[in-house]
Each structure stands twice: as structure tokens, then as C-alpha cells.
Amino acid sequence: MKYTIAGMLALLGATPASASGLDWYLSYGVHDFQVESSDTFGGNVALSFDYLSDNGIVAKGNADVYVDIDKDKLDPDHIPVWFQSAYFVRGNWLTLTPNLSLDWQVDLRGKRNTVSSVEKQIKFYPSLVLDYARPAFGARAQAGVGYFFLEIDDDVPKERGFERGEFGNDATAWTVDASGYYMLAPGWKLAAGVEYWADGSETLETKYRASLTADTSQWVADSEMVLSLEQSRYNLDPYDHLPKGDPDYLPILPWDTDTLFRLYMTVPW
């Protein structure tokens, strides 16, 4: 598997200097997927890689599997296994100061089968990243244009008067992202960010995220413990099948926000 990934990265211009340029990590933990007043608890595992080529190309990725352990009232037919992934390749374009750089980046991210009725989501986009980094704190601003796709599962919509079918909305959209981190103490990092997607002037999604990372190498070699929050707010107007003024109007879902809480440990693999 290591050589397969390395070969894929080589096609993107990231030629490994040695096998040590590609590192693998395993994460495992628990989660709570919250939608309105409903909590869906479970366990999760993830495999991730971190790659640095001899010419400075960085590639990172993770594939996460979540197993929900309770039957949630939101969607009684929901299969309690869902997925999330994120991959990117980044390279330096301009070094403005020793701490400030302008980079290019290409992202591919997605998720499938959440209990909040997200059947499938895909985001694929190139972007420019202004990155300011110091040992104690840092900030990043990202702007790009790319492909946005969101499909709603049809189980809940059919109970709200929608015909069964594929409820997908895609767009060539623009996105901006702002994030930052602060080292609270040696081995303790607090990070936060916000991501916004829009199709012209129409909002598609706003996502907020925060995390607290602790170095736990004193207990498990080269390990970290992470407590994270990720909240997504979706615009469901593109899925309307009746005008909003119609007395029979209902949005496709009775909610437009979901929040994922995670507590997990990451170790070398």
C-alpha cells in the first residue's frame, strides 16, 4: 500500500526522497453526532498519511470510519456506519518572510451516510493559502473555486411529502477558510477555524471547527490525544419542491445543522 500511495503522489509532482518521507498514523476514539436535541454516540477509527517530498511538496490525507452504537430517532432506517475523508496536496509559491508564505493547494474532501441525512458530499477545489506560522501561534487564510456536491438521503424527505429519488445539488462554487492555532503550553495546542461555501451570492454551507490537542507521548510513544468539534450548517433551499409561501411547504429536512464531537488518540502505524 505504501508504494501505491507513493506512486499516486508522484503523478502529482511529489517524488519521495526516501521511504521515510511517507508516514502513516492510526486514530481511534469515540464520538457524539448531534442534530438538534438528538445525540448519536459511537466509536471511530481512521487511517492517515503525511508525506513530504524532496522538492517541498506536502501531501496529507485521512479516511475515517464511524460506527454508531444506538438507533437514532432521526432516521429509523439509517445504517449505523458512515464515512468521512480529506486529502490535499500543497506546495510553496512565494516565501514572503521567514514566517509568512503564499502556497497553492488542491483539496478533495467528502462524507457519506451520516445520521443527519447527508447521503453524499464532495468538495474538490484548488486554492491559494496565505500561511503565517510561528512556534507559539499561527494563522491561515485560504480562498478557492471548485466543485461542491451535496446529496440528501431520501428516507426522511419521503415522510415530509417528497417523492423518493436522488436529492443532489451540485455547483461550481467559491470557498474561503480562516483558521488559527495557539500553543497554550508545551504540548497543548488550541485551534479553531471557519469555512464558507457559496454559489455566487447563495450560501451553500458554513462550517465551524475547533480542537484541543495534547501530546501524550509520556504514555504512548509519539501519540496525541485530540478533543474536536465540527459543526456544519447547510442551505437546504435548493431542494425545495414547493414555494415557501405555499401552505403545504416543508423543507426537505426538519434540521439544517449537525455537530460532530470527537475524542480520539493518534499513534504512528
Image: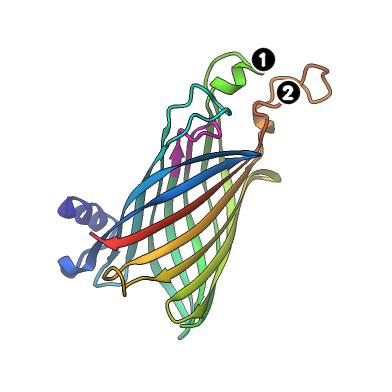
Of the numbered discs in the image, which one, if any, rests on residue 250? 2
Location of residue 19 with respect to 123 vertically, above or below: below
User: Is 228 drawn above or below residue 205 in the view shown?
Assistant: below
Residue occupying the point 55% across, 70% down: 180
The three-letter amino acid code for the residue at tag 1 is Gly
Image x and y of residue 92, in percent: 40, 71
Residue that mark 1 sits on? 161
| Left-right relation of 71 to 161 | left
Find the distance from the CA under tag 1 to the CA under tag 2: 8 Å
Q: Quadrant of the C terminus?
A: bottom left
Can you give x and y, in whole percent of width and height, for residue 63 in the image? 35, 48
**Crowd band around label 2 with a 10 angstrom C-alpha radius: few (<14), some (14–19), many (20+):** some
Write down the region rendered in magenta: 110-122
- Give whichever of 3, 11 is nearer the camera: 3
Residue 117: x and y in percent read 54, 31
Q: Is residue 141 visible?
A: no
The colour scheme is rainbow
Left or right, residue 175 beside residue 108: right
Give the mark nearer the N terminus: 1 vs 2: 1
Task: Tell me the amino acid under the disc marked 2.
Answer: Leu
- Element at label 1: loop
User: Residue shown at 34%/48% (left/top)?
Assistant: 45
